[in-house]
Image (cartoon, helix red, strand yellow):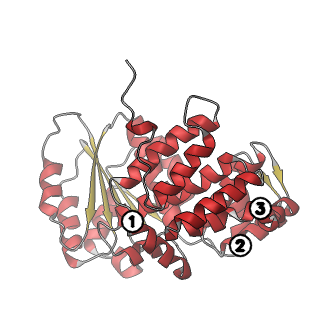
Amino acid sequence: MKVRADQLVTQLNKNLAPIYIISGDEVLLCQEAADSIRKAAQHHQIEERLRFVADAQFDWQDVILESQSLSLFSSRRLFDIQIDKMAEKHSKALAQLGQSLSEDNVILLTLPKVDARTQKAKWFSQLESQGVFVQIWPIDANRLPAWVQQRAQAIDLSLSRDAAAIICERGEGNLLALSQELEKLALMHGAGAKIDAEKVIDSVTDSSRYSIYDLSDRLLMGKVKEALHCLNQLLAEGIESNIILWLINRETNTLVSLLQAMASSSLRQACQNQRIWDKRIPFYESAMSRHNQVTLPYIQNYLALMDKSVKGLDGPDLEIGLRNLVMMFCGYKPTMTELDLPPQL
């Protein structure tokens, strides 16, 4: 059964199919469709999730054997399988997998964009007939402002048509960038705010607020002295700590996503899949040369501590904490932070 992305939640509310196929080039929309299915699986008491990224060297027998075995921990399991590039070995394995679907498992299959020929293939038709196929289409430029307005409404912002048009122009059709711009506006103006064209323009042209993106460049390139100087200027000009924290958190999450994607693709391909502009890829290449599976989780944990400070709870001093984050991001971990202190008795 084929459903549109905007029909998926309605289908999930009715029943949980044995297999879901998500296909498309829009990373953000594919991620959100997959998240909806994962949440629905949890709602149906499916707690065990098995994650697989199928690259050219992937051994499909592990998945097939696992799907045919019983779980020791739960009665039902979610098989979360991502394929970034289709190949003959993948289609053969999926045909075999489709012959052994059961009520004990739910399969979430995320594919790149599949063409009409692939959709008519026997293995694909077999899977689609047993489950749900969600084809993610790019959003037409004429429909993009309306999409941005709907997105803003979902995070409790009221966005004028002119404001949406300006945001679309800035984002150049990059849905991830558009979504992040809305999150920034929500952070700056608060829930329930009415955003007109003037407020959007102010957020761009205000030199002090706009310079947080200068901080982003310095962080990604690892220029610690310049980044600390930029941070000091922002703080002196009265930029709120939560705005700076939002920026560092956004870039950290991007690096985490790139690191995960690099398990099955090159860094440049991962950047392109994340809709990072070509001229910005060298910035992320520089950052990824300094970070790994140890450093990024450490920064994320420290960001969580800083979030407590911003909310007025126990946490690091805001200015010291932000400087620590700048140093960590640039590859110079402070001698010790609050994360390294032993727990109090």
Which residue is under mark 1?
Answer: 290
Judging depth in this view, the residue of 233 and 160 nearest the camera is: 233
Judging depth in this view, the residue of 310 and 88 nearest the camera is: 310
How far apart are the two marked residues, 1 and 3, measured between alpha carbons? 28 Å
Residue 42 quadrant:
top left
Mark 3 surroundings: few (<14), some (14-19) or many (≥20) residues within 10 A: some
Residue pictured at 65% horizontal, 66% vertical: 213
* 198 to 49, vertically: above or below: below
x and y, in percent, of residue 321 in the image = 56, 44
The kind of residue on which mark 2 rests is: Arg
Residue pictured at 77% horizontal, 66% vertical: 204
Residue closest to the far top = 345
The kind of residue on which mark 3 rests is: Ser
Q: Quadrant of the C terminus?
A: top left
Residue 119 quadrant:
bottom left
Mark 1 surroundings: few (<14), some (14-19) or many (≥20) residues within 10 A: some
Question: Does residue 253 appear in the picture of this structure?
Answer: no
Residue pictured at 33% horizontal, 53% vertical: 294
Tell me the number on the disc at residue 170. 2
* 75 to 266, vertically: above or below: above
Q: Secondary structure at mark 1?
A: loop
Which residue is under mark 3?
Answer: 208
